[in-house]
Image (spheres, rainbow, N blue to C red):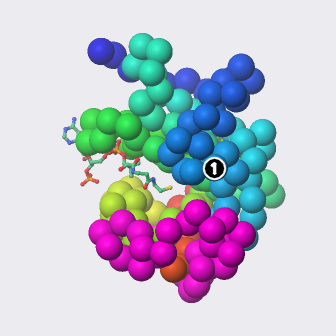
Amino acid sequence: MTSNLRRLAQADYPRLRQFLVEHWGSEELIAHGNIYGPEQLEGFVVEAGNEWVGLITFFIKDEECEVISLDSLREEQGIGTQLINKVIEEARARKCHRLFLITTNDNLNALGFYQKRGFEIVKVYRGAVNESRKRKPSIPLVGMHGIPLRDEIELEIKL
Ligand SMILES: CC(C)(COP(=O)(O)OP(=O)(O)OC[C@H]1O[C@@H](n2cnc3c(N)ncnc32)[C@H](O)[C@@H]1OP(=O)(O)O)[C@@H](O)C(=O)NCCC(=O)NCCS
């Protein structure tokens, strides 16, 4: 089935909330101590028929664009690349001077994915996930690949 990438519209927000709960355990996302509610986020979705098979959300402030979430539900078909490229294009068009994001120390797949697409690691916030866990106890102690989930890692592309 062919897929279609489009910008999130106001009518999509109930579904966005549901998607974030399903994939990130809460409709509010925490990165480096900031809490982002769905109403603050912009995004693009990839649809196959009626199904959301990819979603990226982002937040633009002070000429910086932060990717808040990226999910591909059909991996290794180019959906993640399509979505990140779309946000790079959007951030450039809106005169941002950098695009950045936070991932966690256990997410080896994401660390590889972003670095292969031009992102560089610029900061490590040691123990930041441990701090977030105090506010959101559902964050597990052990993350992907059995790696202790502790740190936030910031990656960026200068635009
Ligand atoms: C990280 C993530 C977004 C990548 O999404 P994806 O849709 O699998 O990404 P792509 O398909 O564009 O690229 C993944 C790989 O598949 C390959 N690929 C793309 N299209 C392909 C195709 N048609 N056939 C075979 N391989 C293909 C790409 O080359 C890429 O490999 P590379 O990184 O070695 O170049 C996805 O794994 C994910 O949702 N992870 C869980 C959530 C997460 O961790 N999000 C990021 C933190 S915010």
For the N terminus, the image quarter is: top left
User: Residue at position x 53%, y 30% from top?
Assistant: 45
Q: Viewed as shown, does residue 78 lie left or right of 62?
A: left
Extreme bottom residue here? 126
Q: Which residue is mark 1?
A: 26
Extreme right residue here? 62
Q: What secondary structure is found at the residue carrying circle 1?
A: loop
> Residue 60 colored magenta?
no
* Vertical relation: 93 (above or below) 153: above
Position in image of residue 154 (x %, y %)? 55, 71
* Vertical relation: 151 (above or below) 58: below
Amino acid type, label 1: Ser
> How many numbered marks appear?
1
Extreme front residue here? 137
Q: Viewed as shown, does residue 87 lie left or right of 105?
A: right
Q: Viewed as shown, does residue 59 lie left or right of 108?
A: right
Position in image of residue 158 (x %, y %)? 57, 62
* Vertical relation: 82 (above or below) 156: above
For the C terminus, the image quarter is: bottom right
Q: What span is in magenta?
A: 120-149
Residue 24 is at least partly visible in this image: yes
Q: Viewed as shown, does residue 153 lie left or right of 41?
A: left
Position in image of residue 75 (x %, y %)? 30, 41
User: Residue at position x 69%, y 28% from top?
Assistant: 14
